[in-house]
Image (cartoon, rainbow, N blue to C red):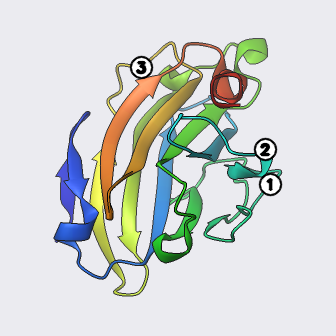
Amino acid sequence: MSISLKKGGSLNLTKEVPGLKKVMFGLGWEMKPGTPLDLDASVFILNSKLKLPSDEHFVFYNNLRSPDGSIQHTGDNRTGFGDDDDEMILCNLDLIDAAVFEILITVSIHEAEARGHSFGSLKDAYIRLYDVENKREILRYDLDEKNTTDAGMVFGKIQKQGTEWRFIAVGEGNGMSGLQGFVDKYV
C-alpha cells in the first residue's frame, strides 16, 4: 500500500522498505485546457555542502546519466499527455557514491518567462516513488496547486542520513528563475 505524503512530510525508506535498492521517481502532471507547456524533470546530486561535485552530477534532458551510473533520466516528454508518469528517473541506491548527501528532484517549465507560463497552468501534479524490483508504489506526493507563479519547483528529495535514505516531500518553488535558478544555486 502506497503512503501519501503532504508538503514537508518524510519517510525513512531504509526502515519502511528494508532492502530497497532500485527505485523510479515518476513525475506526472496534467495541463489546464489550452495551455501547452514543456516541463522538464531534473536531478541535482549534491554533496554535504549542498553543491554539485561536478557538472555531470546534474542529470537532465541533455545529460541522462550520473557519472557513477546510479541515476538515469529516461528522456524528455515535451507534451505531458497521457495518464501515467510523464517523466521518469531511475535510481540504484546501492550504486550512489558515498560522498552524496542529497538528491533533489526538480521540475521546471521550459522557456517559462518568455512565454508567460507558470505552475498555475497545471493540475494534478505529483511525484511518486516506485520500488522497481518489487513492482509497487512506495509513496506519492501530490503537489499543492497554490504555487501559481513559480516556473521551477523542487518536488522532493532523498537525503542520506548515516546509512539510511529518507524521502522528503518539498513542494518549494523558485519563482520565475526556473531551471537556471537551480543551476545557479547548486553549481
Please, what secondary structure does the residue beneath circle 3 have? loop
Q: Is residue 132 above or below residue 119?
A: below
Residue 65 at x, y = what percent?
73, 63
Q: Is residue 50 above or below residue 117?
A: below
Look at mark 1 in the image and give the residue it sits on.
63
- What residue occupies the far right of the structure in this picture? 62
Q: How far apart are labels 2 and 1 at the CA level?
A: 9 Å
The answer to whether residue 91 of the structure is visible from this angle is yes
Question: Along the line of sight, which residue is nearer the eye, 74 or 65?
Answer: 65
Write the residue at 57% across / 56% down.
86
Write the residue at 68% across / 71% down.
69
Write the residue at 21% across / 65% down.
2
The image quarter containing residue 138 is bottom left
Look at mark 3 in the image and give the residue it sits on.
147
Please, what secondary structure does the residue beneath circle 2 have? helix
Under mark 2, the amino acid is Asp
Label whose residue precedes the other's in the sequence (2 or 1): 2
Horizontally, residue 78 falls left or right of residue 35, namely right
Residue 149 at x, y = what percent?
51, 12
